[in-house]
């Protein structure tokens, strides 16, 4: 698709690029009339000169997201619970990665073009005040994920401590031993230390973590394969053969696709929070290609063979296969390998937790009161709430099962994604008025009714109810894996329906992208 400039904007002489924003100069991204209730440094447009990310930074966001302990556990759980052949599970996960790539290319483009995070993009469809609602919903979901991933990262630290102690303690509180609690507190404190260092420090951390985790996973696979012998390759299909056939198998295949999409749902909708820092649309798309279908394929292959190998070597093919790589490493019996793997998985999970589940809710919380809140205050709020949720993971939240947890959170976010995409691409034809996104003028383009687009909120409510019901209603159990897909499609369709015939420009100002 050729990059086009909105009407009334002409590129400065001599500036060309694959990036839509490169046709503008920095002053085009300065908000002329600042309203403190809608604008601060975190929410302000990022000018082209401040965008330092290339494809590698985007690639590493996805690599670390895929490599987290929760990501491995989910993939391994799907091999066991899907009821279809393991090779078909791999194919379903790869297909999900390709679809997620398409989805984030769509959600990232507006932020590359205008340099703004998701809470600001949402103002176009929900209203300058109404955008607080989807941003809050997104923030709550991210905080749940932040707490869950903090717990999963702590299991890696506990593995290292137990490897040194030689025996795990038995007494528990809320389902966790004293070693678990010490590990959990250490991880929570380490994440706070990292976020205080700022986004640049986190990105450097990720650039190290991604390749390091793959290195350790390959070592782990080699160690297990060496013990399992040459029969591992042929036995994978037998171990996860699955009992479902015909239409039931087809349905299960697409349910796996839907669940994996839901796993990425939190990042899909707010991907603009990261894309705004990329130098061009082309760099963003390349990073998404290498980080999703390519990296996810490699990771899924490793997950399948490590899980299958551990089942043969350490469990003699008996009982439920281990799905947490920290538990698998603990079975190897090598203290140094256990410590190395624990540290590496800890690094990977913490890194993506900060980027995917910490930074987005920080923006969302700041968006509630830009004049009073900043990155640091919102960060401590997120860390505090996430700590409570993670502490309850073993005894309360985790009992529902990770796939169901993932599907539920995905069902909540899916309609918001559908509404955003339908509004930007189908209704507004990829054209926004950047100054109006920060205007509380009742005559403004995105003011709607007292700052709220009630029609869009109704579209969200109806879509979300159906998507959540698909996860939790027994009669709709077969649709649970499709909750995200249905929610997004319903959100988009209902938004187009309720906005039919509505004026898209209520502004009395000049209809230009910027009012330089």
Image (cartoon, rainbow, N blue to C red):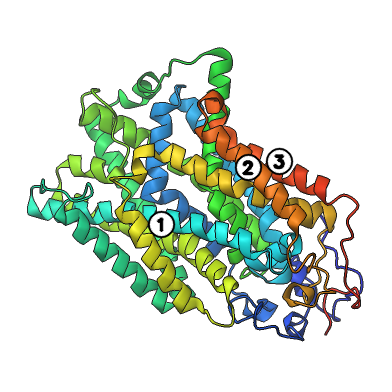
- Left or right placement of residue 179 versus residue 368 in this view: left
First in sequence: mark 1 vs mark 2: 2
Where is residue 215? Give x, y as percent.
35, 52
Residue 98's tag is: none
Query: How many angstroms separate mark 3 from mark 1 (CA)?
Result: 39 Å
> Which label lies toward us, 3 or 1?
3
Q: Which residue is disc 3 drawn over?
A: 490
Q: Nearer the viewer, residue 340 or 103?
A: 103
Residue 99's tag is: 2
Residue 464 in view of the camera: yes
Question: Which element is circle 1 on?
Answer: helix
Q: Are marks 1 and 2 in contact (CB under 8 Å)?
A: no
Q: Which residue is disc 1 drawn over?
A: 211
Q: Nearer the viewer, residue 211 or 135?
A: 135
Q: Is residue 124 above or below residue 45?
A: above
User: Which image quarter: residue 353?
Assistant: bottom left
Task: Bin the neighbour count of mark 2 within 10 Å (Cα to Cα): few under 14, some 14-19, many 20 and up.
Answer: some
> Which label lies toward us, 1 or 2?
2
């Amino acid at each position: 698709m050729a990059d086009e400039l909105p009407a009334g904007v002409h590129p400065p002489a001599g500036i060309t690029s694959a990036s839509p924003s490169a046709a503008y100069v920095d002053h085009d991204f300065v908000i002329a009339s600042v309203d403190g209730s809608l604008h601060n440094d975190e929410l302000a447009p990022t000018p082209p000169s401040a965008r330092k990310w290339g494809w590698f930074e985007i690639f590493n966001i996805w690599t670390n997201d895929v490599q987290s302990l929760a990501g491995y556990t989910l993939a391994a759980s799907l091999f066991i619970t899907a009821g279809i052949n393991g090779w078909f599970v791999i194919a379903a996960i790869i297909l999900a990665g390709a679809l997620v790539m398409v989805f984030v290319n769509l959600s990232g483009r507006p932020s590359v073009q205008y340099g703004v995070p998701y809470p600001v993009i949402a103002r176009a469809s929900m209203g300058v005040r109404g955008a607080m609602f989807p941003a809050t919903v997104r923030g709550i979901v991210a905080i749940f994920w932040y707490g869950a991933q903090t717990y999963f990262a702590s299991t890696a630290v506990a593995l290292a401590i137990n490897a040194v102690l030689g025996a795990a303690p038995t007494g528990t509180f809320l389902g966790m031993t004293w070693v678990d609690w010490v590990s959990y507190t250490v991880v929570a404190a380490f994440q706070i230390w990292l976020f205080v260092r700022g986004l640049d420090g986190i990105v450097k951390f990720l650039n190290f973590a991604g390749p390091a985790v793959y290195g350790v996973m390959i070592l782990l696979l080699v160690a297990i394969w060496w013990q399992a012998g040459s029969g591992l390759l042929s036995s994978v299909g037998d171990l996860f053969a699955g009992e479902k056939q015909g239409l039931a198998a087809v349905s299960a295949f697409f349910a796996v696709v839907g669940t994996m999409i839901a796993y990425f749902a939190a990042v899909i909708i707010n991907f603009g929070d990261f894309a705004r820092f990329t130098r061009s649309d082309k760099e963003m798309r390349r990073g998404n290609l290498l980080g999703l279908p390519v990296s996810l394929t490699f990771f899924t292959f490793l997950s399948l063979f490590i899980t299958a190998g551990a089942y043969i070597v350490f469990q003699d093919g008996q009982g439920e296969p281990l799905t947490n790589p920290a538990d698998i490493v603990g079975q190897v019996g090598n203290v140094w390998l256990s410590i190395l793997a624990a540290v590496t998985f800890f690094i990977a999970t913490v890194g993506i937790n900060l980027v995917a589940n910490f930074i987005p809710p920080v923006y969302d919380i700041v968006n509630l009161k830009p004049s009073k809140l900043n990155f640091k205050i919102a960060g401590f709020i997120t860390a505090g709430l996430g700590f409570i949720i993670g502490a309850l993971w073993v005894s309360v939240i985790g009992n529902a099962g990770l796939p169901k947890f993932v599907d539920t959170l995905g069902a909540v976010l899916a309609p918001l994604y559908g509404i955003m995409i339908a509004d930007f691409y189908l209704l507004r034809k990829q054209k926004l008025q950047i100054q109006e996104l920060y205007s509380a003028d009742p005559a403004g383009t995105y003011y709607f009714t007292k700052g709220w687009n009630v029609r869009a909120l109704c579209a969200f409510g109806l879509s979300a109810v159906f998507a959540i019901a698909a996860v939790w209603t027994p009669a709709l159990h077969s649709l649970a894996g499709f909750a995200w897909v249905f929610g997004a499609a319903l959100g988009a369709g209902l938004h187009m329906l309720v906005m039919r015939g509505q004026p898209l420009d209520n502004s009395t100002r000049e209809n230009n992208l910027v009012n330089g």
